[in-house]
Amino acid sequence: MATPLKSLRETADLRHLRQIIAGLDEGVILVDPDQSLLWANDAALRMHGVERLEELGSDVDAYRQRFQLRYRNNHRLKADDYPIERVVAGESFSEVVVEVTVAGEEEARWVHQVRSLVLNDGDDEEPACVVLVIQDVTAQYKAEDRFEQSFNANPAPAIICRLADLRFVKVNQGFLDMTGYVRDQVLCKTVYDIDVLREAERRDLAKERLAQGGTIPQMEAELELPDGGTKLVIVAGQPIDLSEQPCILFTFADLEPRRKAESALRHSEERFTRTFHVAPVPLAIGSRDGHLLCEVNESFSALSGYDSTQIIGRSLTELGLWANDAVAEQIERAVEDVGALRGQEARIRTKDGSYVDCLISTETFNLGGDACLLWAFQDITQRKSTEMELVEAIEAVMKDTSWFSRSIMDKLARLRSPQPDEGGASLDDLTAREREVLALICRGLDDKRIARELDVSANTVRNHVARIYAKIGVNRRTAAAAWARARGFDDGGVIAALRTKDAIS
């Protein structure tokens, strides 16, 4: 038979039992089957904020009045559900977690993890004493609460997967906002139902680490969205314990804005490239450092006479485009000092040795992440030629104001009231000297032979050739000869007439 209650209080067994459990770190409360509290060790008293057994209560009812218990989900325990009630009823249980609140207070002071133990006297099935074993897990659960609050408040998207079954057990608002999922669509789904490793760069490694419960390094992945779309993210996994269960914390960085920006930049560069190549203005792109050309458009090739294969990888100076070293030094210094040119006048030399007067502008910009320099050339050779003709006409007038040649009168008339050029350039647009040079071009003479024939310098001939090209809209000698012959130009007759006129003069 079980030892009666009153005699149990005085037995040596009770004294021995108290000696054994007095120094334990776990709290121990001994309860008689009649629901009276027999004894509690110091650890159990500390876990309830009291110093004496009487402050716990004389029996189970008194304990329940002084301490209110509720589960972690804030549901208060009914009287019969109190661990102390259940242990008195002879129920065996383990690891029941409850929050303990002192009567009259709102906030719980402690979190206890409780298990039961029933002591029988010999073979008697009736319990001689029941034991409540308590662990204070307040610090652990407070840490979990802090983690929960931090996890939910963190704007960085995050989700927690339980390793035992690979199901998501927690998701924060950042992840919901990033993906458009609602909480119920995520929780209890597996890591492959909502595949956070979809199209990952190192998916096999990530799956291996996930199976091992190890760290998953950062990698790009395509996260599937509830509307069927995808989002580019960086995902990483970190092992954690949550409620003593091994889990993986997945964190994310949204790369979609970067992908959209890169796409917009790529489209912008594509539009720039298309515009660049079809632009009627001669354009070239070079590196900001060293000015090595990486791209030219068709207009530039037409102006310079060089095709892209002869230009790419060389600087304008190395190409020999500048008329002379002084021009090259002037342009290079201006670009370095000012950073950008606006309408800088300079003369360039084309592939066939002719010269073109240009206005040059530059602009620094980024292309593909590299600092580049855009060169723009405006051909002003014809304008310069017109200015020179005007100067020559004025000088002729100033020398002999009593005589105006018809050609001068025509030039002054055109300058005073310019008429639209409906049919393109004509022979009348060329000066006498230019027609003479054109006639020799038609004969197939080069610049040196023309210079000897006309008794002028080769440089003067080149300037005349450049002006002829600009006026009639060609850039090759054969094209100039074809243009002249198509207009019935009599090269021999022109030269003879001009020489006769010079002899008379």
Image (cartoon, rainbow, N blue to C red):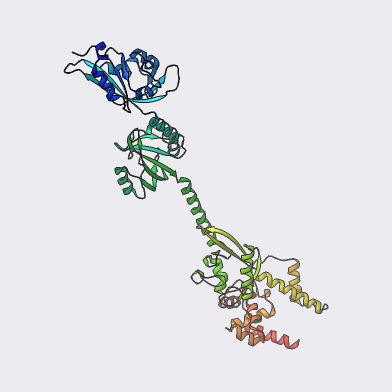
Q: Is residue 49 above or below residue 465?
A: above
Residue 465 sits in which quadrant?
bottom right
Residue 191 in sight here: yes
**Left or right: 3 in relation to 219:** left
Percent coordinates x, y for residue 469 in the rendering: 61, 74
**Left or right: 208 in relation to 74:** left
Percent coordinates x, y for residue 398 in the rendering: 81, 77
Residue 283 sits in which quadrant?
bottom right
Residue 360 in sight here: no
**Left or right: 45 in relation to 437:** left
Q: How many marks?
A: 0
Q: Is residue 248 above or below residue 29?
A: below
Between 169 and 502, the residue placed more toward the observer is 169
Quarter placement of the C terminus: bottom right
Q: Is residue 359 above or below residue 98?
A: below
Quarter placement of the N terminus: top left
**Left or right: 479 in relation to 456:** left
Task: Please tell me which residue is depicted at 46% across the width and 34% down the height of the picture.
Answer: 153
Task: Please tell me which residue is depicted at 72% across the width and 86% down the height of the picture.
Answer: 502
Task: Please tell me which residue is depicted at 26% across the width and 14% down the height of the picture.
Answer: 10
Instruction: State the residue lying farthest toward the right.
Output: 402
Percent coordinates x, y for residue 482 in the rendering: 57, 77
Between 193 and 82, the residue placed more toward the observer is 82
Percent coordinates x, y for residue 501 in the rendering: 72, 85
